[in-house]
Amino acid sequence: MERGQLSPYCLKHYLYPKILSMKKIWMFTLLGFMALSSFAQTRTNKDGSNYQFTVEKEIETTPVENQNMTGTCWSFSTLSFIESELMRKGWPQLNLSEMFIVRQTYIDKADKYVRMHGNLNFGQGGEFHDVIDMIGKYGVVPESVYPGLDYGTSKHIHGELEAVLKGIVDAVIKNENKKLTPVWKDAFKAVLDVYLGPMPTEFRVDGKTYTPKSYADKLGIKPDDFVELTSFTHHPFYQPFVLEIPDNWDSKQVYNVPLDDMQRIIDNALEKGYGVAWGSDVSDEGFSWRNALAIVPDKDWDDMSKAEKEDVFTNPVQQKKITQEMRQKAFDDWETTDDHGMHITGIAKDQNGTKYYIVKNSWGDNSCGGFLYASESYVLIRTTCFMVHKDALPKDIKKKLGID
């Protein structure tokens, strides 16, 4: 008899007391089949697709949000990551303010932009560590305290805001006075007050009064708990280096590990119930938000017909085997660029056994409710950097990196 099967004799005479009626026996049997059916239930990426994903691991997340017409994915993805971290530690679902972090980052970025005489990337982009740094320096607030929508729209749109802010810092650098005034930062902050709202100094949550710093302390968010990593060969492994991407405006260092270790860290984090803040290229032809897939077919895109290119997002195909050399070449050739930050929340496999990561995005809804499936191959070749809790690191890698 195969495991999981029970003979009628065993059911009738051993597993259930004789006092049970046949009606109850059939009821329990039916419930068992329903439970098995629910456990084996698969998902797909869109209506009409032949992809069948079986979830192997999935962490709890807060609802999908929409960054809309802004370049603030780094804030949305990192706070989603933090919100899941808080739930992992027993907190209820919280909705933290992305725009509070964006506001504080703009202030620090403006200061460095002027100090660097404009030789710095000034724009809407940022990195995961920006969020962690701002929480450490300024704290954090709930979304209800600081929605950051004081400019007359119901959705975020920052084109005008960015232009006005950059106009200020460029005028300061041009410096017609031949000397900086002591008030330019006040003017800069005033613009942020008008567009996003004044800086909250105190607010109440559940009947208690907090400052942004005391609220972050209450939540127990410790900046030193988080580690940012990548995998490239132009720097030594197991050492930190300044990742050369434009949005790393503060020149922060990330840890460098071999590709196999990068994958081990991501998998270990998810298996232990931790999320992963994921930075990736999304300009690749294999990234399709409409189809809720990010894939690297074994057959090169240039060798595919138009019909084949459409078909791979409906019918599973063999994924390309990624090597360290392929990953490095893609970065060196600018095929992999620092485009977008998202939140990896789980692991799944398709019907062919191909591994995928479940990814929460911040672009609102799509065919997967705001999520997508990124193949293991896509993650290995297109990851620019990622962040995890330090306790999600395998012990041997943690030791090699010198992290306590």
Image: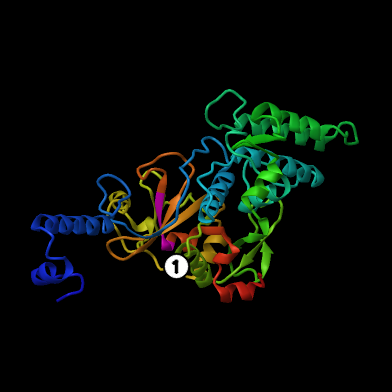
Q: Closest to the observer: 164 or 372?
A: 372
Q: Identify the residue under disc 1.
A: 322
Residue with the most extreme front position: 19
Figure check: 204 above or below 316: above
- Percent across and percent down for residue 227 are 62, 61
- Percent across and percent down for residue 164 are 69, 30
Residue 373 is covered by the magenta coloring: yes
Q: Closest to the observer: 117 or 138?
A: 138
- Percent across and percent down for residue 101 are 65, 42
Q: Which residues are magenta?
A: 372-377
Q: Give the residue at x 54% y 56%.
A: 89
Q: Quadrant of the N terminus?
A: bottom left
Total numbered circles: 1
Residue 84 is covered by the magenta coloring: no
Q: Give the residue at x 16% y 59%.
A: 29
Would you call the spot at circle 1 few (<14 residues within 10 Å), some (14-19), or many (20 or more)? Answer: some
- Percent across and percent down for residue 298 are 36, 63
Q: Specify the principal SS of the magenta part.
A: strand
Q: Give the residue at x 71% y 55%.
A: 251
User: Which quadrant of the figure has residue 236?
Assistant: bottom right
Q: Closest to the observer: 247 or 130?
A: 130
Q: In the visual, does 232 lie left or right of 290?
A: right
Q: Give the residue at x 68% y 26%.
A: 194
